[in-house]
Image (cartoon, helix red, strand yellow):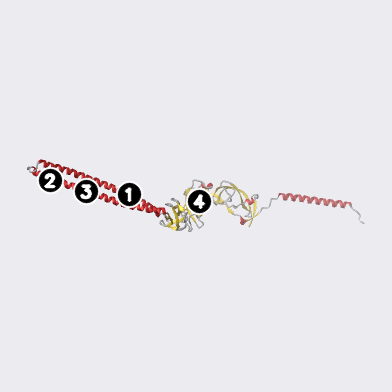
Amino acid sequence: MDIPRPENKRKKRMRQAVIGAAVAVVLAAVTVGVGRLQPAAPSVAFASVWPDTVRRGEMVLQVRGPGTLQPHEMRWVAAQTDARVERILVKPGATVMPDTVIVQMSNPDLMQKAEDARLQLEAAKAGFEEKKLELRSKQLDEQSAVALAESQYKGAQMEVDAQKKVADQGIVSGIEYQRSVYKAEQLKIQLQIEKERLDQASSLSQAQIAAESANVDRARSAYQRVLEQVESLNVRAASEGVLQQMLVEPGQRVSVGANIASVARPDDLQAELQIPETQARDVQIGQKVSVDTRNGVVEGRVSRIDPSVQGGTVQVDVELTGDLPRGARPDLSVDGTIEIKRLDDVVYVGRPALAQKNTTISLFKLVENGAYAVRVPVKLGETSVNTVEILEGLEPGDRVILSDTSTWEDRDRIRLDY
């Protein structure tokens, strides 16, 4: 027969109470400990980030901008007269010489004008010849009159001389002798008058010939101008180079002065770069430039800086001093890097994403042999195309992540998986 023992039941309840209290204390401690733990560092594939090592030495400050190759001098070919385009003989890209005909045009009114000008020139020439014959005839008449007067005067003078000898002997009366003297003097005066008429006629003839010659020259110049206009209907390249643009089409009517085509030398190009206005303030004429044509890099120097800002950029013209690579041509897209200056003995690193001059940013620095990266504040100085100056926060030899880390902006530590 079993005998009940109340003390055993009390001991069992006490033991269960102690165990329950211990379990509660342990659970509470675990809960507090877990609450105090930091979130686990996110894992990031090392291959997906862009690391770089902080260095000390010379840092080159550069600015970069896109652009195009453009002819150093573009020659525009314009219409010399109103006309209609008949044929286009040369297409853009072809090599042309100064006398190469690139477009043929027509103008019937101009052709009629040329014929009228030719007839006017022929009429002026005929009038000139007629006037010369007329003046020559008058001159001969005057010369004949002078010769007749001279002959009459000499005859009268001979008669005076003959009568003087016999007048002294009384053979001829004194009255008759004086009459012969007066006649000789009258004929002498007549000879002088005829000579003056001949001189005046000669001067007048020269003036009239000069006037008629001027009329001929005027008609010839007018005809020559029309011929030049007719010749301009065969539009020529006017310079050696490559035809860049053709701005007209067959059947199109063009007015005088309208551009028809453009010609440029393919070996005489310059780069026109578009530099952001915030960086253009450091650009100066004469600075070295490297122009990447996608088929080679050409050296050059800044030759001109546009004084105005267009669309947030400043145009910088670069004179190319190196040899152009094969395939370089106008409107080819290029990238230009301008060397601003060099900084000696500075701490620098590759340029992080969104880095700006004289700002403080946070970067992830690799620690624990590259197993983790922790966020550190970094003060930047000068910035270049590919590098930035480090003023505070990093030392030479540190390795940092330069790629965009905005995905982990709420984390101060990440784990790198290799």
Disc 2 to disc 1, how far (Cα)? 52 Å
Amino acid on which the number 4 mark rests in the picture: Leu
Check disc 2 and report the residue beneath it. Answer: 159
Looking at marks 2 and 1 on the same chain, the residue that comes earlier in the sequence is marked by 2
| Mark 2 element type | helix
Is the C-beta separation of discs 2 and 1 under 8 Å? no
Residue 181: where, in percent of width, then height?
13, 42
| Mark 1 element type | helix
Q: Residue at x 27, y 50 (%)?
A: 134
Residue 119: where, in percent of width, then height?
35, 53
Disc 4 to disc 1, how far (Cα)? 58 Å
Q: Is residue 116 visible?
A: yes
Q: Nearer the viewer, mark 2 or mark 4?
A: 2
Disc 2 to disc 4, how far (Cα)? 105 Å
Circle 1 packing at 10 Å, graded few (<14), some (14-19), many (20+), is some
Q: Nearer the viewer, mark 4 or mark 1?
A: 1
Disc 4 to disc 3, how far (Cα)? 83 Å
| Mark 4 element type | strand
Residue 273 image label? 4
Residue 295 image label? none
Circle 4 packing at 10 Å, graded few (<14), some (14-19), many (20+), is many
Is the C-beta separation of discs 1 and 3 under 8 Å? no
* Quadrant for the N terminus in the image: bottom right
Q: Nearer the viewer, residue 170 or 392?
A: 170
Check disc 1 and report the residue beneath it. Answer: 215
Is the C-beta separation of discs 2 and 3 under 8 Å? no
Looking at marks 2 and 3 on the same chain, the residue that comes earlier in the sequence is marked by 3
Residue 207: where, in percent of width, then height?
28, 47
Amino acid on which the number 2 mark rests in the picture: Glu
Check disc 3 and report the residue beneath it. Answer: 143
Looking at marks 1 and 3 on the same chain, the residue that comes earlier in the sequence is marked by 3
